[in-house]
Amino acid sequence: MADNTIADVPIEIPKHPRVLCVAKRGRECWLLEFRCVWCGKLHQHGGGPLDGEPDAGHRVSHCHDPWSPDGYELVIARVAA
Ligand SMILES: [Zn+2]
């Protein structure tokens, strides 16, 4: 019996995938910025007050691409000087 099921498995996007971002100092708070793999644009999220460490973690998605998830888990890859 031929088994072709692997070809039929759809790409599974985790509900809240991890996304690497760069933390930058904004005017009033940390900014978490990343180039979106779904739509190709830059998305920016607030990352907490500047007198503390940048705060990543779960965010509701800013992406309007139909393939993008509702939210993601931001992981800081680099803190920009
Ligand atoms: Zn996007």
Image: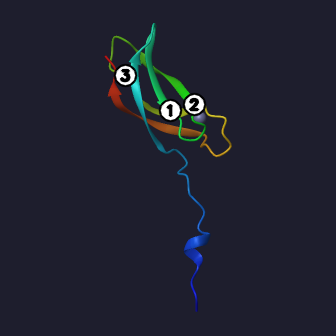
For the residues labelled 3 and 1, the Cα–Cα distance comes to 18 Å
In the drawing, what numbered circle is on residue 35?
Answer: 1
- Tell me the residue at 50%/32% (across/down): 35
Q: Mark 3 and ligand 1: say if the CB distance to the nearest ligand atom is below 8 Å.
A: no
Judging depth in this view, the residue of 80 and 55 nearest the camera is: 80
- Tell me the residue at 57%/35% (across/down): 40
- Above or below, 46 against 71 in this view is above
| The C terminus lies in quadrant | top left
In the drawing, what numbered circle is on residue 41?
Answer: 2
Sequence order check: which comes first, mark 2 or mark 1? 1
Q: Is residue 19 left or right of residue 2?
A: left
From the viewer's perspective, is the residue at label 3 or at label 2 nearer?
2
In the drawing, what numbered circle is on residue 45?
Answer: none
- The three-letter amino acid code for the residue at tag 1 is Arg
In the drawing, what numbered circle is on residue 54?
Answer: 3
- The three-letter amino acid code for the residue at tag 3 is Pro
